[in-house]
Image: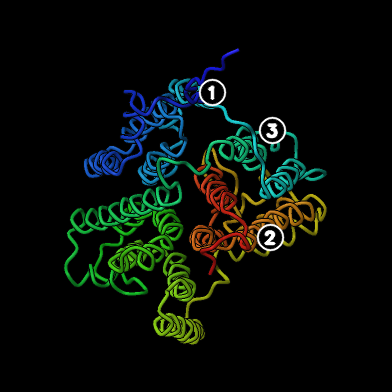
Amino acid sequence: MRSENKTVKPQLLPLEASPSSRLSTIRRFCMSANFMWLNFLCGAVFMLTGHPVAAAVFFLVLISALLFICDDVLATTLPFLLLCISVLVCYDSFSTFIKFIWLAPLPISALLFHFIRYARPITLGDSLWGHVGVSIAVILGGIGAIGLSDYFSGSSLYYIAMLGVGLLGAYVLMKSQIRPRTDYDIREKLITVMIIAGAFACLEVAYLVCRVTFEFSLSAEQFTDYFLRLQSHSEGIAPNALPLIECIMQPSNNLSTFLMIILPVTFYRAVRKNPAYALTSLLFLAGLFFTKSRSGLLLGGVEFVLCIIVFSLLIKRRALKYTFFALGVLILIAGGIIGCRILLDSSASVVGEVRYSLLLRSFEDFKNNPLFGQGIGSRSNADLYPGKTGTILWYHMIVPQVIGSMGVVGIIGYGLQLFFRVRLAVKKLSEYTVVFFMSYVGLLMMSQLNPGEFCPIPYGLIAVLLFIMIENEPDRRANKSQI
């Protein structure tokens, strides 16, 4: 009996296209730098012409198209970030965007198609249990204290669902698709996406600064007093113009949050790829400064110095490594001393701040219901902060939010999540896990003075993505590029 040697062609997975096919060519273009900068250009046109709502619709349609076309969910990352940054100027615009609810079937059907048609086997990592703990905490939060009408209000149900099982589901689905690929390095691709998004955030900061300068005809002295001093002064600006200027600059905290998430990747690129990227880090730092966000100025400066310290460890030349490390430590110490002196000498007091009042209220809320807190959807603090349509009443600080809204159950749930995230970063320690973890540190820092991670879209989803990338790295003992 004669045996025949048959050439067996490798079978493509259902989600794969032949490398020479037209679909494969389109997919490669959708992940290319040219396509990413084209996204940037489109977003810039909408921004500079003052059409943020049109930008949101454009990027929503683009994301939906990419979900249908591409098997790689990372293709949607940059359009998603550009959409989120574009609409930051649309503060308190629930009534504006609810008119576009008729578009909802498009992204929903695109998501269903993508994760069904391009389905991969489910794989779970160490982040799972943190998401489970948070899901339990937000669902049980407020039991025994919150009224049924508040718990089952639209905004409450949205945040309960999205902060808990929503981000858990996003983790499971994204984890199944975001894996190392043979056609490109997903880590470097995400870093490129983040840098382009950071440049877009800086462009928006510049646009807002120019808008204020020209609309209100600021003189050079007024511009210097308002934008170039650490503590802005408004002498010479008409009193009735100040509320309008503050309204234009209201995206400052959110723009600062994006820039703090993205800032660490510029240090990584400067150390590992090209020292010229250090100029990009300075650009992002300047963007933080010009937002005039107090949180961004304070915490962004601290993060910048921490990045100098952390990423100095990646420098191969020992002399430079120790020099930058020592420089960062000295700046951190000096900055701490100067900051304390400014606070002690300043006549400003935090006692009158709404955040301070909410901080004190969080302890009262905990005391009144220590096991489950007052609940995410509680309206009991409306006397201090009335909130905006479609949102919950933030404490504007993540620790008081957990303590006051969810009590002991919340402390355990969010504590578990933080524990597993830190343990994961240590377990997978490498140059890539450092950069993604430092990006999360930037988000976590801003969450101490702003809603931050309690905004499931985009910040909670960004955190999920960062830790999926960390999970994909080999364990520290097997990693040859460990620090």
> SS at mark 1?
helix
User: At 50% across and 81% down in the image, what residue appears?
Assistant: 343
What residue is pinned by disc 1?
A: 112
Q: Is residue 386 visible?
A: no
Which kind of residue does numbered mark 3 sit on?
Phe
Residue 262's label in the rendered image is none
What residue is pinned by disc 2?
A: 361
Q: Is disc 2 surrounded by few (<14), some (14 to 19) or many (20+) residues within 10 Å?
A: some
Q: Position of residue 394 (x, y in %)?
A: 59, 51
Alpha-carbon distance for marks 3 and 1? 26 Å
Which kind of residue does numbered mark 2 sit on?
Arg
Image quadrant of residue 36? top left
Q: Position of residue 256 (x, y in %)?
A: 42, 59
Alpha-carbon distance for marks 2 and 3? 23 Å
Labels 2 and 1: the sequence-earlier one: 1
Residue mark closest to the camera, 3 vs 1: 1
Q: Nearer the viewer, residue 243 or 155?
A: 155
Which kind of residue does numbered mark 1 sit on?
Leu
Q: Is residue 154 left or right of residue 292?
A: right
What residue is pinned by disc 3?
A: 152
Residue mark closest to the camera, 2 vs 3: 3
Q: Is residue 168 left or right of residue 297?
A: right
> SS at mark 3?
loop
